[in-house]
Image (cartoon, grey):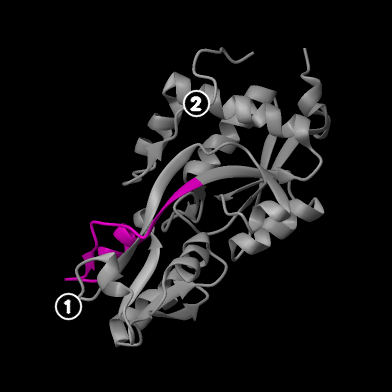
Amino acid sequence: MTDPRVADLIQTGEIRIGVFPSFQYSKDVATGEPQGLAIAIARTLAARLGLRDVIIAEYPSPLDVVDSVKRGGCDIGFMLIDPTRAIDVDFTPAFVQSDFTYLLPPTSPLYSTADVDRPGIRVAAVRGHASTAALVRIVKQAHPVYTDTYEGAVDLLRTGGADAFASIREIILQYSAQFPGARVLDDSYQSNLAGIAVPKGHSARLAYISEFLDDLKRSGTLRQMIDAAGLRGIDVVAPENPNESYA
């Protein structure tokens, strides 16, 4: 029996997802095939609904995904939950959590997030990302230096154009492997939560997808997806209704 809350998606036979390069989404270097946690979740949702296809709309930044979801360009979007984004879209409860921290060059004299927030310290940050929005809200003395990509931020760090690179821990860990001697701080400047965005006014779709995510949490499937994607520093958020069964 078709669940009326997602009847519109079932009628189209597909689900359109909005993604951007992040810890949740990337492309296989060898094949160019999309991969990551967002893809695994979307394909599992499509299978649950009996949909024939997942249409992947890749955007440069999370702000572009927000705009697409808002305007109906895609049905759902994968991103970190941020209050500024919630003005334009609605979010499910968080399904994973991590933290924001810094990558430092090998010779850096900085050893904590408090050390970074000092006058004269330049922090590379990617425009439009939740880690950047949090950085701007939190730091009082350090100066953000903006780039459009993760690679650009790391290049600033490598060439001396920045003293630290701020992002989600998983991304920081990935890029530390490409920068011999670079250090990842143990502490963080903020915890973060990832959710799925839906257009405003689609409360029924939001409720269905929220229940679906709860089911992935309770069954252990979400943890398996995280491990299969090789993600580090990413934890599953407890289900909203731990004692309920998904129907």
Would you say residue 52 is visible in this rendering?
no
Among the two numbered marks 1 and 2 on one chain, the one whose residue lies closer to the N terminus = 1
Q: Nearer the viewer, residue 77 or 188?
A: 188
Height in image: 130 above or below 241?
A: below
Q: Which residue is mark 1?
A: 109
* Quarter holding residue 168: bottom left
Residue under circle 2?
A: 239
- Side (left or right) of 235 relative to 27: left
Q: Position of residue 48 (x, y in %)?
A: 63, 23
- Residue 126 higher or lower than 92, as above or below: below
Q: Which residue is at 77% across, 12% downward?
A: 1
Structural distance between the alpha carbons of marks 1 and 2:
41 Å
Q: Position of residue 46 (x, y in %)?
A: 65, 31
> Taking the image as drawn, is residue 187 in sight?
yes
Which label is found at residue 56? none
Q: Residue at x 17, y 75 (%)?
A: 106
Give, as a single range, the part of the protein colored magenta: 172-193
Residue projecting furthest to the front: 140
Residue 209 found in image quarter: top right
- The residue lying at 23 percent from left, 76 percent from top is 105
- Tell me if mark 1 has few (under 14), some (14-19) or many (20+) residues whose alpha carbon lies within 10 angstroms of its own: few
Residue 12 as seen in the image, left or right of residue 76: right
Q: Quadrant of the C terminus?
A: top right
